[in-house]
Image (tube, rainbow, N blue to C red):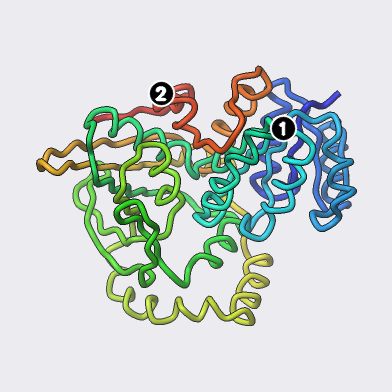
Amino acid sequence: MAEWMIYGANGYTGRLIARAAVEAGLRPRLAGRNAAQITALANELHLPFTICRLDDEAALRRALEGMQLVLHCAGPFQETSAPMVQACLSSGVHYLDITGEISVFEALARQDQTARQAGVMLMPGVGFDVVPSDCLAAHLARRLPGANNLVLAFQALGSISRGTAITMLTMAHRGCERRDGRLVSTPPLHEVRTFDFGRGPQPCVSIPWGDVATAYYTTGIPNIKVFVAISRRNLPWLGLVRAILPLMHLKPIRASLQNWLRHTLDGPDVTTRATGKSIIVGEVTDRAGQRVTGRLIGPEGYSLTVATALLIVRRVLAGTYEAGFHTPAGLYGPDLIYEVPGVQITG
């Protein structure tokens, strides 16, 4: 009998995780609202499945019967996580997801005490968002105790799925950073800095990435910013992009773009996933001016998501968990990422 469930298994990342789980000898139950796609994938992989919608509370609870955990892969998570989390808390089922959305991390952090009382672990962000960056942040904080500033920047060498693109649209109209322990809204893409990913200075722009939330809970560092690499040829267009992004807040425009993305994107192919790389650089400083830097190099982002998600699933199924809200490195430590083949951290 399946002991865990992948909800949203028909999405790009959900499919990758389901297939990798079977190759690893695991037998998850597949679930989602798209009957045709879930049924086809379940038949292909010879797995049990359930068709249910997140807005059907009774059906969702029935789907969770007998489960130890759910790996939630249906985004955008700020729209889908709440009903699944509530069902898990009511059913005593541990909750994992692959979000990178600040609002989701903060919402689940606020449910820490409720989860502890229910004996349920809530661990959002068990994929590329945010396991490698969370571990790098914890690694740097361990090297410089007392650090009060953390900056992370990443360079993902590969394309993205439609689900990732749609999620990014929902966050695009504003920025966010952490100052003195508090989340502060900023204009979108408001700051540009250069970082060295291994080939000299690379321009990067600030974004509202999940680590603005999670790294604070993992390390206690009160000031956090996250950046993503952009090409130099795109720098002249940055002002125009900044002016346009607030329009993403308008529902008709966002809905039209989401519909276009659903018909134009799938995700990186097998060659890209096999050959691509993820590079994350980090820097911590303290009040005395001391500075420690590090660079994490790992597999392509979706391959990394599959590996880290299944790594944490296995830990939970083996009984290695704690009730309440947790970040990956906060619970499992900064060396968790070393269990993924091909990952290295240099300082």
Residue at the location (70% across, 50% down)? 11
Q: Position of residue 18 (x, y in %)?
A: 72, 36
Quarter containing the C terminus? top left
Direction from residue 230 to residue 327 in the image, left or right: right
Position in image of residue 60 (x %, y %): 84, 46
The amino acid type, in three-letter code, at marker 2 is Asp
Q: Residue furthest top?
A: 318
Amino acid type assigned to the residue bearing label 1 in the image: Leu
With respect to residue 136, does 31 lie above or below? below
Query: What residue lies at 30% left-to-right and 42% top-to-bottom?
Result: 281
Q: Classify residue 258 by image quadrant.
A: bottom right
Residue 253 coordinates in the image, percent (x, y): 59, 81
In the image, what residue occupies the spot 36% across and 72% down? 187
Q: Residue furthest left?
A: 288
Q: Which mark is residue 335?
A: 2
Q: How far across and how far down the image is residue 278, in percent?
A: 41, 41
Tell whether 342 sits left or right of 33.
left
Mark 1 residue crowding within 10 angstroms, few (<14) / some (14–19) / many (20+): many
**Relative to residue 11, is residue 320 drawn left or right?**
left
Nearer the observer, 98 or 325? 325
Q: Which mark is residue 69?
A: 1
Q: Assess whether mark 2 and mark 1 are in contact (beta carbons under 8 angstroms).
A: no
Q: Quadrant of residue 250?
A: bottom right
Secondary structure of residue under mark 1: strand
Quarter of the rendering occupied by the N terminus: top right
| Mark 2, other Cα within 10 Å: few <14 / some 14–19 / many ≥20 | some
